[in-house]
Amino acid sequence: DIRDAVLAFFQRRQQAGGPLAGVKVLITAGPTHEPIDPVRYLANRSSGKQGYAIAQACADLGAQVTLVSGPVALRPPAGVTFIACESACEMRDHAMAALPVDVAICAAAVADWRPDHVAGQKIKKQDRTSVPPPLVLVPNPDILAELSEPSPMRPRLVIGFAAETQDVHEHAQAKWRRKGCDWIVANDVSPATGHMGGDTNQVQVITRDGVEAWPEMDKTALAGELARRVAAWLARHPRRDNVQNGGTHG
Amino acid sequence: DIRDAVLAFFQRRQQAGGPLAGVKVLITAGPTHEPIDPVRYLANRSSGKQGYAIAQACADLGAQVTLVSGPVALRPPAGVTFIACESACEMRDHAMAALPVDVAICAAAVADWRPDHVAGQKIKKQDRTSVPPPLVLVPNPDILAELSEPSPMRPRLVIGFAAETQDVHEHAQAKWRRKGCDWIVANDVSPATGHMGGDTNQVQVITRDGVEAWPEMDKTALAGELARRVAAWLARHPRRDNVQNGGTHG
């Protein structure tokens, strides 16, 4: 609509000289829904707010953003290439199709597992006490690990999110080592924190340099800070093919 | 807000002489979410649109409506007592607490089953190929059947919905016999129809008098028609304690 067009116009003007101008960023956001039958599915409580805020923040700094999103109740940010999907397998395919990018930020809460079989028709309850067969689950593609694998298509910077409800630091450290990504943004999503679905977040950022605990802040502020960190990292780590233009690795 | 207050004011004026004036109606709507752990849950694709439209239509005809709703993205209708819930067990408790009512309309897509155990912490994936234990499911309370049971608290008219993806008529007939409700409103929610989550619906209404196939119409129109049928039925079946005032059973 008109509001979007106006916003996008001014955004493009702003972006031209932004610190992420010319940088391609892939962002995944939201939950995935894993179908059980035509009406039922497995889901998780991700609202997509953090990922959408990051997409907006990167676009505001001039990046060319592709946002691959599971089902959420949010409006896609203006000026962003938006791709809606539902299941982890679909999200993986859309994420891989978006390559090459400079930066990948995996903020989606991708379902670890999906039902091994999707029933073609609604599974019927036989009577009031009948019990269905247990739901057998199989592992989903690991999008963060796939993006992190050494390859000519690997983004220069791959950032994962870790949503934990206990031992946040330990689980996030283990995830960082296991996935092969560059940074992990870990947050506590215990119901008592209100972070899952809420407007604020509190994270620890794990990089090669160690762990940094950020104060609690709203998701928009956190997104802005993360986008600035990404821009600073890219400035310190220019593309290999730009090294002759004066860049240094460090 | 102000809009709601103004709408509710005019609605109350309108209602005073409506055909459902003084009639208490309980409506369930939306899906239920059945928790697996603090972040994961089982869900279904009900949008709540049909149930919310029925709540609005009954209120417009003067009824005192209690709407018990699972998680949806809709705004509760003005002038309705609104109770939000998540799981089938919560929905059952809220529905039973709303009794006595004259009419119960169970439009919610209540999950037939829930995980037998809710993990207190997020279930961890061990490595990329590890498979979790199968999800063991147990039957949920059958709210429609409970409301339909003969009891002094039984609503005079209990209406259930049947969402089917095949053999709609046969499954709905079986449900009508099994549940003990008075009417079943059956619809085809195959993905190809677009009814699940969409703005239109096409139903068959099963009563003691037989089956009536309604044409495809938008959910608001369907809700209005259903509310008028309810009013007509109540006019033909006055409360027992009103029989001396001239009512007849028939």
Image (tube, coloured by chain):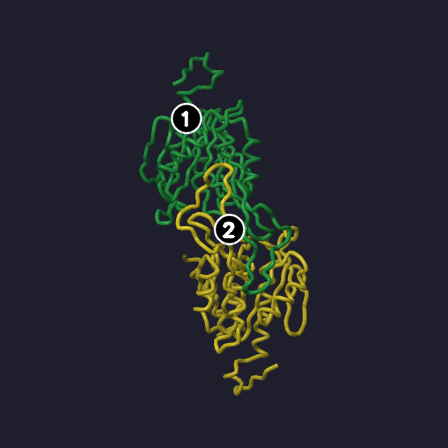
Chain colours: A green, B yellow
Image point 46% across, 74% down: which residue? B100
- Residue B106 falls left or right of residue A157: right
Up/down of A197 relative to A68, above or below:
below
Q: Name the residue nearer the viewer: B150 or A137.
A: A137
Q: Name the residue nearer the viewer: B67 or A38.
A: A38
Q: Quadrant of residue A20?
A: top left
Up/down of B131 relative to B30, above or below:
above
Question: What is the chain letter for disc 2?
Answer: B
Report which residue position mark 1 lands on: A231
- Regarding residue B162, the answer to whether it shows in the image is yes
Mark 1 surroundings within 10 Å by alpha-carbon count, few (fewer than 14), some (14 through 19), many (20 or more): many
Q: How many marks?
A: 2
List x then y, in percent, for residue B132: 49, 45
Provide the secondary structure element on which disc 1 rests: helix
- Regarding residue A6, the answer to whether it shows in the image is no
List x then y, in percent, for residue A192: 35, 49
Report which residue position mark 2 lands on: B135
Q: Quadrant of residue B144?
A: bottom right
Mark 2 surroundings within 10 Å by alpha-carbon count, few (fewer than 14), some (14 through 19), many (20 or more): some
**Label placed on residue A149:** none
Badge 1 vs badge 2, beta-carbon distance below 8 Å: no
Q: Name the residue nearer the viewer: A215 or A146.
A: A146
